[in-house]
Image (cartoon, rainbow, N blue to C red):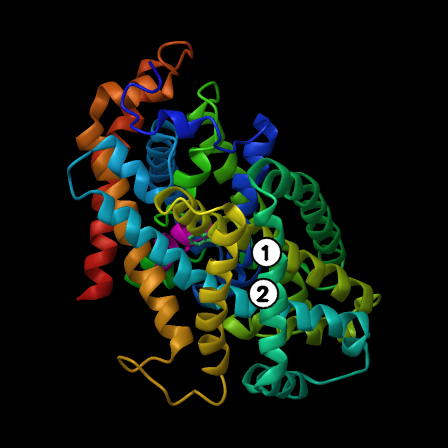
Amino acid sequence: MKDANSPHAAHEHQRDSFGSSFGVLVALAGSAVGLGNLWRFPYLVGENGGAAFILIYLGFVLLVGVPIMMSEFIIGRRSQANARGAFKKLAPGSLWFVSGTLAVLCCLLILSFYSVVGGWGIEYLFKAFRFDFTRGGDSAGLSTLFSDFASSTWRPLVCHTVFLLLSGLIVILGVKNGIEKFSKVMMPVLFLIIIVIAIRSLTLPGAGAGIDYLFHPDWSKVTANTYLAALGQAFFSLSLGSGMVITYGSYVSKKENITAISAKTAAADTLFALIAGCAIMPAVFAFGISPGEGPGLVFITLPHIFSQLPLGGFIAILFFVALLLAALTSSISLLEVIAAFCIEEFKMKRFWAVVLTLFVLWVLGCLCSLSQGVLADWKIFGRNFFDLFDFLSANVLMLLGGLVAVVFVGWKLGRTVIHDELTNSGTLKIPVWLLDTLLFLIRFLAPAAIAVIAIFQWV
Ligand code: TRP
């Protein structure tokens, strides 16, 4: 029955898959937890006034993020195919698959700049191991240190290359032996490290102001932009609209509970973001730094804090290890979307699919890296390569991908299929009110929310 709609039944038994429920959860959470939590979330919270932003963000994760994740999950698991193949199998002869092709393109764009930032993480880990941040250093000096490094030509390129190679090695090993094994070990380590840093930060004298900032909402700071930023962050942080959940979902067995896994993934991602907030904000306040520092928070402000903190040298090492692990478990998910596409759509071997993808990514990533320095003046639509790739993926392609996913599942596949997938053909008991609520979110609320944010952004 499973293969009734599959033209590729013979080739299907060779598909890799996750080995356990825990493996599925850590792989998905690994994709979700990344630079988005450690770097983007704290600075957005800082720029948007703290607790009120967090509450709005939580609302979006629950009401919009989870339904989109479940929709992508349904597409992936039902089709057992890559992001483009999935639409072709579920809606043969139609144009829905274009959305899958765009998703692959989206991952390519994201990973191009993501691997550059990952490379910066490698450099900073290196610096941390040399205890560079413990030798005094005022924030002006650290700011020059960062911009000098990021705008130089060779070192960032070398770091970017190393980061890509590390991701490639894991993905070449496959889904069960590479991605799942790596995530199973690294995700618990990552959580442990960030909890240790949070405890250190929360016990600083003056940490209370940071906690206040994180948990006492000031609604007067909320504007239309706050909502846009919060929904955008929910998309980015949960890795939505880019074929990731479709691809990982396609490696998941028909026995897993889609509702539960989606809720747990979202919970893990949100919990991690909040703990990261607790690790960063109290320290920011204790040392009298402005929380609205912007994207430089991680690479400029934090080293400054490390340089003044008792045991700061070790905390710096822990922090940049965490940053690198978080970035790697996310980058492998982006790489897997592209690799799965090459393997299934062009019948390539996994090894060659990854090598080819890495090569393309390396070239695009070099452009992003150099756009911080020698290529700063090469602009397309007024943006350098780094900003253009960021804008196209986060502000255009991901929103489009998320919208298509919920509309496809809500209206094209429809109620019976959703019911069938969420209850695993009737074997799972899911209360009717929950199914009805989810159906409403998938069909109406999520598409409306995405449409509103898209219109606000593009007009
Ligand atoms: N969610 C990751 C983060 O928070 C980034 C990421 C991984 C991602 N895969 C993605 C973002 C797919 C968008 C789309 O850092």
Q: Is residue 311 left or right of residue 425?
A: right
Query: Is there any visible trace of residue 216 in the rendered image?
Result: no
Q: Name the residue carrying label 2.
A: 118
| Cβ atoms under marks 1 and 2 closer than 8 Å | yes
- Say what amino acid the circle numbered 2 marks: Gly
Residue 339 vs 144, above or below: the answer is above
Residue under the image location 36 percent in, 53 percent down: 104
Q: Name the residue carrying label 1.
A: 167
What residue span does the magenta drawing correspond to?
229-237
SS majority, magenta: helix
- Classify residue 124 by image quadrant: bottom right
Residue under the image location 23 percent in, 49 percent down: 98
- Classify residue 233 by image quadrant: bottom left
- Provide residue 273's location: percent of width, then percent of height: 55, 51
State the residue in front, 154 or 221. Answer: 154
Q: Is residue 183 left or right of residue 306?
A: left
Of callouts 1 and 2, which one flags the residue occurring earlier in the amino acid sequence? Answer: 2
- Provide residue 340's location: percent of width, then percent of height: 44, 45
State the residue in front, 97 or 183. Answer: 97
